[in-house]
Amino acid sequence: MKAFLLLFSLLFSLAQASTTSFLMVKMPVCLSDESEEFPPIFLLDVPVLRAGGAPDCDFGLICSEYLPPSAAKWAKPQNVNIAAAYGIRITARISAADQTLALTIDATTAHKPEGSPHSIEQVIDAVEKCVKSMENQILPAYKKTVVRTLTAR
């Protein structure tokens, strides 16, 4: 009986540890083109493979690099996530006392890449739209979200 319980608990712990899943992350994407003077920022759904972790950490994926696949073998894929190019980060902090999730869009180390037509404020606005659109997907209904935008130096 003890051996059966030990085997059952071992299998149960292994089954719980394998929580790999896909998540659709909203990312601010700018597809630059030489013909356009001011290319728009799109909010694109990007599938991301996540392995376990707390749901509040998923907001940080908004600012991760995205290298879209290319059918052209001669083209080198480049990062199209404008938040990653500008150096904007998202941090999350959960207060266990009142079940509040505080999300901070951190632009203190943000820099505008040379030749980019968008201001840092425009990119922060796009990141904030991504956070607000992912709220319902990631957060349970009982938690609140506070988005604070820090100014760049």
Image: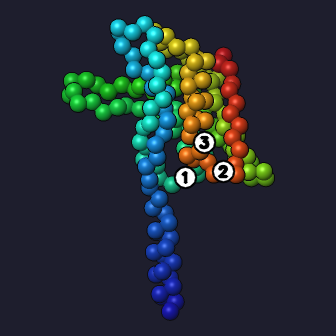
> Is residue 57 in view from this perspective?
no
Residue, x 51% and y 78% (percent of image)?
9
- What residue is rendered at 46% in x and 46% in y? 23
Provide the residue designation for mark 2. Answer: 141
Please tell me which residue lies in front, 148 or 36: 36
| Numbered disc in front, either 1 or 2 | 2
Amino acid type, callout 2: Ala
- Any mark on residue 139, and which? none
Q: Position of residue 21 (x, y in %)?
A: 44, 53
**Mark 2 nearby-residue class (10 Å; few <14, some 14–19, many ≥20):** few
Q: Is residue 145 above or below residue 74?
A: below
Image coordinates of residue 32 in percent, x first then y, are 39, 16
Q: Residue at x 49, y 14 (%)?
A: 113
Name the residue that disc number 3 marks. 135
Query: Dot 3: what SS?
Result: helix
Image position of 41 (left or right of 128): left
Compute the Cα span from label 1 to label 3: 17 Å
Q: Position of residue 74 (x, y in %)?
A: 21, 24
Residue that mark 1 sits on = 53
